[in-house]
Image (tube, rainbow, N blue to C red):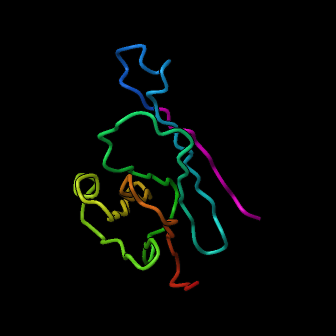
Amino acid sequence: MDEKATYSFYEDDGATLDYKDGEYNVTDLKVKRKGKHIEFKKKEKATGYDTDLESYTLKLNGEEAPTRVRAAKAKYKEVSSVEEVKSTQESFFYDNEEEALYVNVPADEKHKVKIFFNGKKD
């Protein structure tokens, strides 16, 4: 059975009423387990706000360490700390103590990000 989660990320300037003129963004974020891998994808629903957002940091609790992370042919780099993953696009970090996986996804990523476990290749 597949497991999934969705979230709609809303963004505007937070200070004015410019959102009434369409100056806001809405991005749907989806995470779905498919067998031995997890997929993350985003879909922009509204894009009227000029954002300076550079990346999303995905945190998955209670996961095992992944064997690899990629988006299309781009392989994500494994780094050694939460701080490093947050500052390095296309990267991931697994915290053994907390059993938490962090993945830094560029905001302009157009492909699904796939997180593979147990060496299974799709």
User: Whole-percent x and y of residue 32?
Assistant: 63, 60
Tell how many labels: 0
Q: Residue at x 49, y 54 (%)?
A: 60
**Residue shown at 50%/84% (left/top)?**
119
Considering depth in this image, is 54 or 62 the residue closer to the camera? 54
Q: Is residue 107 above or below residue 109?
A: above
Residue 3 within the segment the image draws in magenta:
yes
Q: Position of residue 59 (x, y in %)?
A: 44, 52
> Residue 99: percent from the left, percent from the top?
44, 58
**Horizontal placement of 108 versus 120: left or right?**
left
Instruction: Residue lying at the far right in this picture: please name it.
Output: 1
Check the picture and name the quadrant holding the N terminus: bottom right
Please name whichever residue, 65 or 107, is drawn nearer the observer in this view of the structure.
107
**Majority secondary structure of the magenta segment?**
strand
Q: Quadrant of residue 120?
A: bottom right
Between residue 99 and residue 110, name the one nearer to us. Answer: 110
- Residue at (53, 53) in percent of width and height: 42
**The magenta segment:** 1-10
From the viewer's perspective, is 27 left or right of 109? right
